[in-house]
Image (spheres, coloured by chain):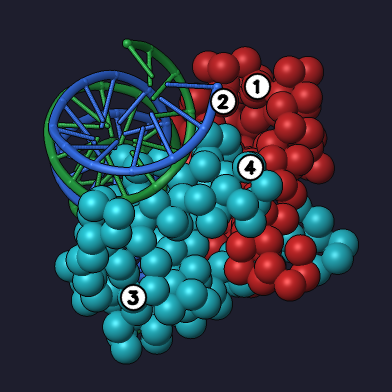
Chain colours: A cyan, B red, C green, D blue
Amino acid sequence: MSNSKLYKGSLTTIILKLLNEHDKMYGYEITQRVKELTKGELKITEGALYPALHKLEAEGLLDVEVAKVDNRLRKYYKLTETGTKETVNKLEELADYIKTMQALVNPKLA
Amino acid sequence: MSNSKLYKGSLTTIILKLLNEHDKMYGYEITQRVKELTKGELKITEGALYPALHKLEAEGLLDVEVAKVDNRLRKYYKLTETGTKETVNKLEELADYIKTMQALVNPKLA
DNA sequence: TCTTATACATAAGAAAATTATGTATATATT
DNA sequence: AATATATACATAATTTTCTTATGTATAAGA
């Protein structure tokens, strides 16, 4: 997302959520899926994505499996058990964040 | 903001929105109001707040007025005209961000 | 042939927070 | 009276997380 600063911090949540739905994805695929789902509003940059994936792997939330398709490298990521649990937490955090922000921005509806 | 990383980037929006409602507030008051409105979920740290206020002032979105109350210093901030316009933009950005995240996290409702 | 798409990666720099300090006055508690 | 907590500002060091720029390599389309 080229756009708002609000996106900061949500990349991990996005990755985990997508992997929770699709079982197994590779980096480039994630960028494309996000572009699709958000109708182009959100463009994950490679400079953000790959380090984030590496970090999640290092933390034990993701497992990697390398594959060669059409003579090109792909790294498939999938959630570990810990990763699945963390996904639940992250999604809760997101829901809380949205609720909190709505309380601030639209206190009448809170 | 002790909590989740999602708050990153939303402090400016919060400040502008509060000033849009309250006409004139000082820093410490903002921290207390946010704590109240979010039932303690969100704690704005001073290390984040004061630099943010100074930046908004430098950008011409806020005006300052120093006062002395009970022998203690207070710096009252209020929106400039530009600040009022920017508040609208920031709130729109927030609404967009929430919509986008919901499309990602809950694609069925999108 | 050249551009775009696919697919990975990292380094430099910027932005925005956290954490740790510091100053100072006022009020509440022991 | 002494101490802790609340009020009110501020900044510096560090960390986190991103953007921008760059690099490598193959495949497909114009």
* Residue matched to label 2: B56
- Please check whether the numbered discs 4 and 1 fall on a single chain: no
Residue that badge 1 annotates: B61
Q: Report whether mark 1 lies on the same chain as mark 2.
A: yes
Residue B106 located left or right of residue D11: right
Residue that appears at 43% across and 78% down: A23
Chain label for disc 1: B
Whole-angstrom CA distance, mark 4 to mark 1, is: 27 Å
Q: Which residue is mark 3?
A: A78
Q: Looking at the image, which residue is at 75% across and 40% down?
A: B92
Query: Who's the residue at 40% across and 86% down the image?
Result: A85
Answer yes or no: are tags 4 and 3 on the same subunit.
Answer: yes
Three-letter code, disc 2: Leu
Viewer-side residue, D4 vs A52: A52
Same chain? Circles 1 and 3: no
C-alpha separation, residue under disc 1 versus residue under disc 2: 5 Å
* Disc 2 to disc 4, C-alpha distance: 27 Å
Instruction: Using the rendered view, name the quadrant where residue B59 is placed.
Output: top right
Q: Which residue is mark 4?
A: A41
Q: Which subunit holds the residue at mark 2? A: B
